Image (cartoon, rainbow, N blue to C red):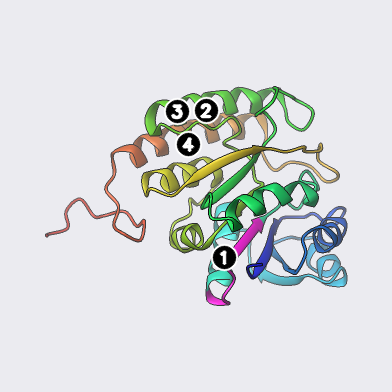
Amino acid sequence: MSKRLVMIPALNEEQTIGDVVREAQAAIQGARVLVINDGSTDRTAEVARAAGALVIDLPLRTGIGCAVQVGYIYALRNGYELVVRLDGDGQHPADQAAALIAKVESGAADVAVGSRFVISVSRESTTATRVLGIRLFSVLMRVMFSLRSTDPTSGLWVVGPAALKLLSSHSPDDFPEVESLAVCQRMGLRVCELPVRMRSRQGGRSSIGYLDALLYMAKVVFSLVVISIRRYDSRGLPKDPLELP
């Protein structure tokens, strides 16, 4: 069994973070639980520590992309071989990561993503606006990157050593899931998707409003175009188009 880390980025999730940490500890054998507290103004960090998690406190709100990258960097520097990412709002039952972990630890995939929509389209754990965005991103991923992804905005990920190394040096600033999938595919990593069950948000509220969602979709579409034409070095870092050979 590889050395495992459960990473949970969290912003103002004091209502749910304790249960999420305890559930992860019970469901994922031998894993250390790390909460990345992204500048919360409530008791998220205190509750997470009380539940037994290691907590990294970011001094201000940086966005989920930065918070996730901090977790990957921590994992890489501390010798972890496998990282399970869960959201702090309770949408991801920790036991649903088992099949994803098995896929990565067996060597069959570098990245395993949990999807609500592999078997059927369910809106139980998401909104109509997000479903629209998911469908748009799914089409773009298939056309631009030859990657079949039914749930590209899913935050339930398991990554192995190769993906951990890549994602610790490359992570989008805002909402990293779609762009990170595209970069993993561009860099030749093996990406798979498995069906999982997700819940509705268990507490708090989403930080993304309707206008934010539209802006997010526009930014991601633009980013995918850039990723599809950009050159990357062996570490997954963008090459400067003006760089001399």
Q: Pick out the residue farthest to the bottom.
A: 78
Name the N-terminal-most of marks 1 and 3: 1
Pair 4/3: label in front: 3
Element type at mark 2:
helix
Q: Which residue is mark 3?
A: 142
Residue 214: x %, y % from top left: 56, 29
- Residue bounds of the magenta highlight: 77-84
Element type at mark 3:
helix
Numbered tag placed on residue 138 in the rendering? 2
Q: Is residue 38 visible?
A: no
Residue type at mark 3: give it.
Arg
Classify 83 as above or below 189: below
Numbered tag placed on residue 70 in the rendering? 1
Q: Residue at x 66, y 53 (%)?
A: 102
How many angstroms separate mark 1 from mark 3 (CA)? 29 Å
Q: Quadrant of the C terminus?
A: bottom left
**Is 38 left or right of 180, judged from the image as shown?**
right
Task: Please tell me how crowded label 1 is: few (under 14), some (14-19), or many (20+) other residues with Cα within 10 Å.
Answer: many
Task: Please tell me how crowded label 3 is: few (under 14), some (14-19), or many (20+) other residues with Cα within 10 Å.
Answer: few
How many angstroms separate mark 4 from mark 1 (CA)? 21 Å
How many angstroms separate mark 4 from mark 3 (CA)? 15 Å
Residue 106: x %, y % from top left: 59, 55
Residue type at mark 2: give it.
Ser
Residue type at mark 1: give it.
Val
Classify 175 as above or below 42: above
Q: Quadrant of residue 55?
A: bottom right
How many angstroms separate mark 3 from mark 2 (CA)? 6 Å
Q: Which residue is mark 4?
A: 220
Task: Please tell me how crowded label 2 is: few (under 14), some (14-19), or many (20+) other residues with Cα within 10 Å.
Answer: some
